[in-house]
Image: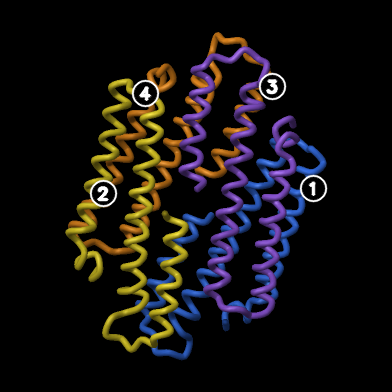
Chain colours: A blue, B purple, C orange, D yellow
Amino acid sequence: MSHTTKNKGKMLSRVRRIKGQVEAIERVLDGEGECEEILQLVASCRGALNGLMAELIEGHLKFHVLVPGQMTLPSQLEAADELMAVVKRYFN
Amino acid sequence: MSHTTKNKGKMLSRVRRIKGQVEAIERVLDGEGECEEILQLVASCRGALNGLMAELIEGHLKFHVLVPGQMTLPSQLEAADELMAVVKRYFN
Amino acid sequence: MSHTTKNKGKMLSRVRRIKGQVEAIERVLDGEGECEEILQLVASCRGALNGLMAELIEGHLKFHVLVPGQMTLPSQLEAADELMAVVKRYFN
Amino acid sequence: MSHTTKNKGKMLSRVRRIKGQVEAIERVLDGEGECEEILQLVASCRGALNGLMAELIEGHLKFHVLVPGQMTLPSQLEAADELMAVVKRYFN
């Protein structure tokens, strides 16, 4: 899993931040905090998860669908960038 | 926060399940598992988070936007159900 | 359907703009335009549809779930606003 | 744009079906139909648009990011399938 290995530190930080957000939801819920606060925390957590997904997809696309070292046309790299631009619009 | 208090046990179970999913992502990522597995875990986690959001919205709608004990027309309860039906289609 | 009647002109403009976007997708597809262009057009169209949905939900919430003229507590209006803030984060 | 050309007929049918759905929204809105009906129509239309997007992404992935005729490892085809499985979970 070359690409996640390469960015492993960065990815793990992202995942741990998401875990922190889930723990905050748990804490506010358990402490009977405001409903509005929980709704906003869940929305933020979903945003962070979408960001992680977009990054995983980008790595998968550039390192597994395309393979560094394998002969790749410039048009293929461009097509991968176009795809990522759309994925990011969806997972923003 | 009456509704989250009422369903607090159920809600907390949901949140803890989500935390377990995030920890699984962390573990697979750290252990350099398959990229595909991580992608699927993130997608499942997002599904669980959407389910939690739908449940929170339903409670918010029925206990804060509408208020039990407050005079409520049958058409208002119906409208709340219609709204939830759409929210669930989006957050499925 | 009081709220859609009230904002009917504005709503219809939104829907017609969306129809125009779908027709643009059709045209580019039929004319064998660039794949990237079509992907971006579809993403824009989805954004416009999400905007329409958010507006419909807001009207439904304020005019059907809550009912103008019906006795409504300030906390209920506030709860409706909180809900809309979350819906808009999801449907942005 | 080889892949949309190849499936052009099928794609155009999809887009025209979506246009029909947008026209139905317009008609119901203009005729002051039920709010609930409009909400459901918009949700269906969004589903159809997501389906179109998933198909466009699949074509883009198989014909532009990967290129038929270009040397492609079996692992690359597999990675593309894995990516599509995740995309479809998101755009269902």
- Few, some or many C-alpha atoms within 10 Å of disc 1 (few <14, some 14-19, many ≥20)? some
Q: Which mark is residue A2?
A: none
Q: Quick check: A54 left or right of A28?
A: left
Q: CA distance from mark 1 to mark 2?
A: 48 Å
Q: CA distance from mark 3 to mark 2?
A: 44 Å
Circle 2 or circle 4, nearest the eye: 4
The residue identified by callout 4 is: D34
Is B6 drawn above or below residue A21 in the view shown? above
Callout 2: helix, strand or loop? helix
Q: CA distance from mark 3 to mark 4?
A: 28 Å
Q: Which mark is residue C75?
A: 3
Q: CA distance from mark 4 to mark 1?
A: 41 Å
Residue ID at (56%, 78%): B34
Circle 1 or circle 2, nearest the eye: 1
Chain of the residue that carries numbered disc 2 in the rendered image: C
The residue positioned farthest toward the right in the image shown = A31
Is C79 drawn above or below residue A56 in the view shown? above
Instruction: Give the camera-side residue of D86 and B10.
Output: B10
Looking at numbered disc 4 in the image, what kind of residue is underneath it? Glu
Circle 3 or circle 2, nearest the eye: 3
The residue identified by callout 1 is: A27
The residue identified by callout 2 is: C24
Q: CA distance from mark 3 to mark 1?
A: 24 Å
Residue ID at (73%, 47%): B12
- Few, some or many C-alpha atoms within 10 Å of disc 2 (few <14, some 14-19, many ≥20)? some
Chain of the residue that carries numbered disc 1 in the rendered image: A
Residue ID at (40%, 19%): C1
Looking at numbered disc 2 in the image, what kind of residue is underneath it? Ala
